[in-house]
Amino acid sequence: MRQGLDADVKFFQYRSKNGTRKSIYETSLMLAPIARKEKACFIVNDHSDIAAAVDADGVHLGQDDLPIEFARKLLGRDKLIGISTHSLEQARAAEAAGADYIGFGPIFKTSTKDAGQTQGIQNLTIIKNSVAIPVIAIGGINQANVQFIAQAGADGAAVISVVLAAPDIRFAAEQLVNIWIRETTKQHHRGH
């Protein structure tokens, strides 16, 4: 997390698919105050109860996790609830159920998770134009293609392996942040 914070990353999701609930809780309990101190957003993946217990900024749910309305009861109105979506129907359903943001993808081929067929930039644009809540692109995003995610109007890009597998994590994160800032600044100037 420290290397990401040093690279000006502002949004962190703790994701542990194989850890015990106790280890996920303990790690989240350690990370949440670090993020808070640095004014970064800290989200726990899958576990609404753990997100509530550590006072995280919110939870990110998958299609097979607790329904949004129950996560909202656990977390309250002031916490973020995001959900991974893989189709226009799922994106609209998430918005209707009260999600604060959606993850959409996989945009490109990814080895991190099995999330079905790739959606591509064209579908990302359709989703972005079909929902009013923020859309975070997920799946196979790296320094070579993050500009296309920004150009499509996504509100953010979720990355794992391209950063964690890099020899220099901070440098890899900085590259992505810098490309994102460059492209979204261009978009902003075009819009005026």
Image (spheres, rainbow, N blue to C red):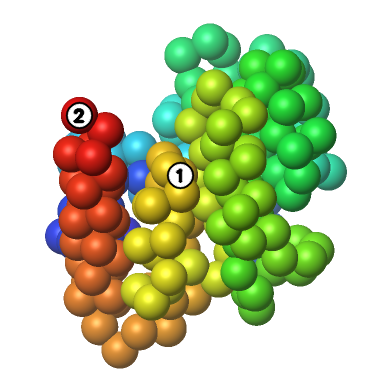
Asked which quadrant contains residue 48, the reply is top right
What residue would you read off at disc 1? 154
Relative to the observer, which residue lies in front, 49 or 187? Answer: 187
**Image height check: is 170 above or below 183?**
below
Which amino acid type is marked by label 2?
His
Residue shown at 71% from the left, 65% from the top = 118
Question: Which badge, 1 or 2, comes first in the chain's sequence?
Answer: 1
Residue shown at 60% from the left, 26% from the top = 131
Residue placed furthest toward the bottom: 167
| Percent coordinates x, y for residue 66 in the rendering | 78, 32
Q: Which mark is residue 192?
A: 2
Tell me the quadrant of the picture where the N terminus can be found.
bottom left
Residue shown at 23% from the left, 40% from the top = 190
Q: In the rendered image, is residue 2 in sight?
A: no
Tell me the quadrant of the picture where the C terminus can be found.
top left
Query: Number of marks in the image?
Result: 2
Of badges 1 and 2, nearer the viewer stands 2
Residue shown at 49% from the left, 32% from the top = 134
Q: Residues within 10 Å of mark 2 (few under 14, many from 20)?
A: few
**Image height check: is 33 above or below 7?**
above
Task: Give the side of residue 153 with respect to residue 60, left or right.
Answer: left
| Percent coordinates x, y for residue 177 in the rendering | 25, 59
Which amino acid type is marked by label 1?
Ala
Task: Give the side of residue 138 with respect to residue 115, left or right.
Answer: left
| Percent coordinates x, y for residue 188 in the rendering | 23, 37
Task: Give the side of residue 130 with respect to residue 79, left or right.
Answer: right
